[in-house]
Every structure is written in C-alpha cells, then in structure tokens.
Image (cartoon, rainbow, N blue to C red):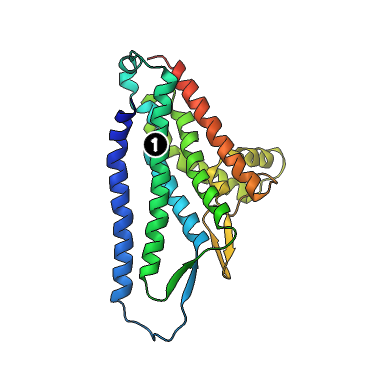
Amino acid sequence: MYYVELLAVRNRFAWFSLAVVLVGLIAVIAVRLAPHESADLPGIAVPLNIILLGSSWFACVFATLMAGTLSRDYGHIPYIWTRPAPREKIALEYLAVDLAAIAIAFAILIGASIATLSAIPRLHVVADASSWQILLRGLAVPFMWYGLVEVATSWNGARARAMIGVSWALFWVLAILDALGFPGILGKLIVVLNIFNPMAYLPQTHTQNIDFQVGVLGLTPLPLTFNEQTVLVYAIFAASCIVAIYAWKRMEA
C-alpha cells in the first residue's frame, strides 16, 4: 500500500523543493545584481548551526503538509482494510514514506541554504563541534511535530485537516503562555504541556559572536541536558507514532 502514499507525497514534495530552489536562486541573483563593495573586505562566516535550525523550522512546515496521513483515506477505510495485509503494516508503510520525505526535505533545505550562501560573495559556511548535536535536534523536531499531528488525526478523518492547522496555533499559544510565566498550578500545568510542544525544543545557538533563535523565547520545558532533551524528542515522536497506529487500527469505518 505504500505506493498510494508515494503518489500523495510526490506532488507536495515537488512543489516544496521547487519553492526552496527558487528562493535560493532569487537570493543569489538579487545579491549579485546589487552594487558590489570593495573586494578587500574580509569574508563573513555564517555558522552552520543557523542553517540547521532554520532548515528545521521550514521542515516543520513540510511535516505539517505531510501530516494527517492515516486519516487521508478515511472514506476508503473499508476497502483498505480488506487487503490481505495487517493494518499495522499498512500504517507503518504510510508513515515510513512520510518520514523519509521529511528527512529528504530537511536535507534539501540544508543543501540549498549552504549552496545559496556559498554562491554569495564574501560569505562562507562554517561548522563547529556542536553542529552534529544541532543536526540531530533539527531533524527530531519536525518528526515530533508530525507524530503529534498523527495522534490527533488518525482516529478522526473528518476533522483532520482542521486539526493540522490548529497545531500551529496551539503550539504558539502554549509557548507564549509559558513565556508569560504564570504563577502557581496554572504555570506548572503550562510547563508540563510544553513538554509536548515541538517549538520548545528549537534552541538558541551562540556561534561566531552571533545569537540566533528559531524557537519561541528559548523555552526549556525540562531541566535536562541538550542531548537528553534530543532523546526525549525522539521518544515522544516514536510514542506518538505507536499511539497513532493503534488509534487508526481501532477506528470504526
């Protein structure tokens, strides 16, 4: 059944990739057509971590375009479940196709960003020792976002598309409420809810004397180390996929 999801992914992926490439080309052309300053000026180092975090943010956008997979065939569930294959296998094939597409989109975003910046005079990309950690976190966040949306939509196909859009509003609201720092039980409840907020795990990066922040106000929902938080994000993602598959399996047509 995975070929059905491949067909659904193909168009979204093509349009997303085209948009990324066009934005990069426009940026390069605009810079090259602008008046040039003295060639004697020193080059500017662009931290790779900034590219990784920015790519993670836009990969979250792509992840929400792909999300809602298990609810997409809501009207055809009786037909799909008559196939001689376990429901878990069908669901896993769907999710595997989507996750591969998200990972490839993340890689394309990184590659296009590096190529674009490298094509602009005086700019060059530099990595540091934390780049691998940022890379793993950058991929974990859109995966987590995707998994949470699947949990919310796998059991109810009729409202799936609305729930996908609501996820952006919900995560923003939770992040802002946490930043306001409410006292007492309400404040603690908001902190707990933000453990399941992907935006809370997009960190600040401090490299090459540059402070760059993609997430909302640098939230730190749990007193864990950076690597421990990354493991937590992948754990929430994996648990979300399991729950989504279980809910889809039990859904009555």
Q: Which residue is mark 1?
A: 98
For the view shown, which residue lies furthest in the right direction?
184
Residue 62 rendering spot, x and y as whole percentages: 39, 44
Q: Residue at x 70, y 38 (%)?
A: 185
Viewer can see residue 144: yes
Residue at 70 percent of width and 45 percent of height:
183
Where is residue 199? Give x, y as percent: 53, 47
Q: Quadrant of residue 163?
A: top left
On the question of residue 194 being in view, the answer is no
**Residue 145, horizontal then vertical, whole percent:** 49, 40
Q: Residue at x 55, y 30 (%)?
A: 239
- Residue at 38% x, 84% y: name it: 37
120 lies above or below 223: below
| Dot 1: element | helix
In the rendered structure, the answer to whether residue 7 lies left or right of residue 61 reads left
Amino acid under disc 1:
Asp
Front in this rendered view, residue 207 or 97: 97
Q: Nearer the viewer, residue 35 or 119?
A: 119
Horizontal placement of 17 versus 63: left or right?
Answer: left
The mark tally for this picture is: 1
**Residue sitting nearer the eye, 10 or 194:** 10
